[in-house]
Amino acid sequence: MLKLLYKISLLILIFLSATILYQKHTYAYHTLTHINPIPQTKTLIAQEHYVDAHKYLSYFMQFDYMKENTEAIQLLKEIEVKRSSIAYKSSKFVEGLSTGMSDETIGQASAIGSDFLLIGDLRDLALEGTHYYKDEEVDAVLVSLSTIGLVASVSTFFTLGSSAVAKSGVSVLKLAHKSKRIPAWLGTYLTKEAKQIRQTKNIDSIKPLFMHLDTMHKHTGLSDTLKLLSKTRNLKELQKTAKLTKRYGQDTSILLKLSNKTLLTKSKTLKNFDIKTIKLASTYGTSGLVHLIKGGEKTFIKTTKRMKAYSKVGYKGEIWKMFLSFMKYLSDTVLMSIMGIASLLLFPLRKRKRLI
C-alpha cells in the first residue's frame, strides 16, 4: 500500500511539474500582471502635470479591473475639478500668450494663435536679437524656427492659405522647443534647413516634416503630438509614428509608452490584431504585447479569460496570486530536474543502479 502511494506521489509530482512547465511556455501567466496606474497618476499630480495625469488614468479606467476602483474614480474627479477651475484656465491662457508654451489646450491655443499673427515670430526674434546684442547665448533653434515661420507666413498670405500647414507646423515645433521636447536630431535638421530657406525664401524642402506633424496633430491632438515628437530619433521614425496615429488615434502616445515602443518596432505584426486586444495587452505592459505577438490573438484572449476566472479562486484571488508567485521562482531547470529525479525514483532500485 505504501509502495503504491509512493509511486502515485511521484507521478503527481511529475504531472504538476510538467503542467507548470507547459503553462509557463504556453500561457505565461507568471509574466502577465496588470499595471496599477494610481501610483504614477499621483506622481504626475504632485508634479502638477494634470493633463498627463488625466490622460494616463482615463486610459486605464476603460478596463474592467479599474472601472470600479473607488480610489481611481476619486482621483479622476479631483483632476477634473482642478482643470475645470477658472483660475487654472486663466493662468494657462496667460502662460501660453506670454511664454509661447503650455501643456493645456487653452494655453497652447493662445501660444499658436500669437504665432499665426506674426506676433510670436517677431517676439522670439526680438528676444534672441537682444541676447545677441548683449553678447549672451542665442537660441539657434528658436531663431531658425522664427525665420522659417516668417517665410511660411508670407507664403501663406500670397498663396491664400495653401501654406497654412507649414505655418501650423512651425508653431507646433516652437511649442515643442520651449517645452524641451524637440529631440537633438530635429534641432540640427531645423538649423540646417533654416539657412537654405533664408536664402531661397522657399519652404518646400521642409514640407514633408510639416505633413507628418499635421497628421499627428489631427489624430492625437497637440499635447500628444509634442510627446510623440520628443521620442523620435530621425525623420523616418517620425513618419512611422505619424502612420501609427492614423490607426491608434489619441491612444498612440500611451500605447507607445506602455509597450516600450513595441507598438512601433512591431507595427507590421500588430496590424493583424484587433485594436481592442492590443489595448488590453498594453495593460500588462511590455510583457502583454510580447505574449500577444508570440502566442497570437486567440491564445492571448484565452489566457486573459482563464486568468479572470482563476482570480476568483480563494479569498479575492489570493490562491491564484500565490500560484503566480510560485511560478515566477520555479525556473525551467528546476522543473525539469524535479521531473527527472521523480522519474528515476519510479524505477526499482536495481534498475536505477544499472541506469546510473
Image: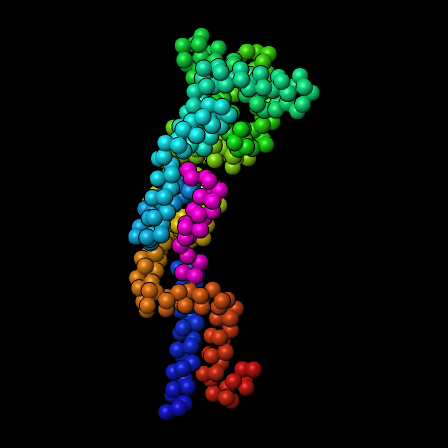
Total marks in image: 0
Q: Is residue 166 above or below residue 278?
A: above
Q: Position of residue 50 (x, y in %)?
A: 42, 39
| In the foreground, 306 or 125 | 125
| Image quadrant where residue 51 sits | top left
The quadrant of the image that shows the N terminus is bottom left
Tell me if residue 131 comes above or below residue 72 in the rendering.
Answer: above
- Vertical placement of residue 243 versus 114, above or below: below
Which residue is outermost to the right? 135
Give the percent coordinates (x, y) of residue 250.
Answer: 38, 36
Image quadrant in which the C terminus is located: bottom right
Protein image colouring: rainbow
Q: Residue at x 37, y 47 (%)?
A: 75
At 32% from the left edge and 68% from the top edge, which residue is drawn?
315
**Residue situated furthest front in the rendering:** 87
Q: Residue furthest bottom?
A: 1
Q: Residue at x 44, y 9 (%)?
A: 157
Residue drawn at 44 percent across, 58 percent down: 31
Q: Is residue 240 visible?
A: no
Point out residue 17 in the picture as x, y percentages from the top left corner: 43, 72
Q: Is residue 206 visible?
A: yes
Query: Residue 165: x, y in percent?
Result: 43, 20
Q: Which residues are magenta?
A: 29-51
- Residue 349 to residue 163: above or below: below
Residue 55 belongs to magenta span: no
User: Does residue 315 appear to the left or right of 264 in the view shown?
Assistant: left
What type of secondary structure mainly makes up the magenta span?
helix
Q: Using the image as rendered, state which of residue 99 and residue 18 is in the foreground.
A: 99
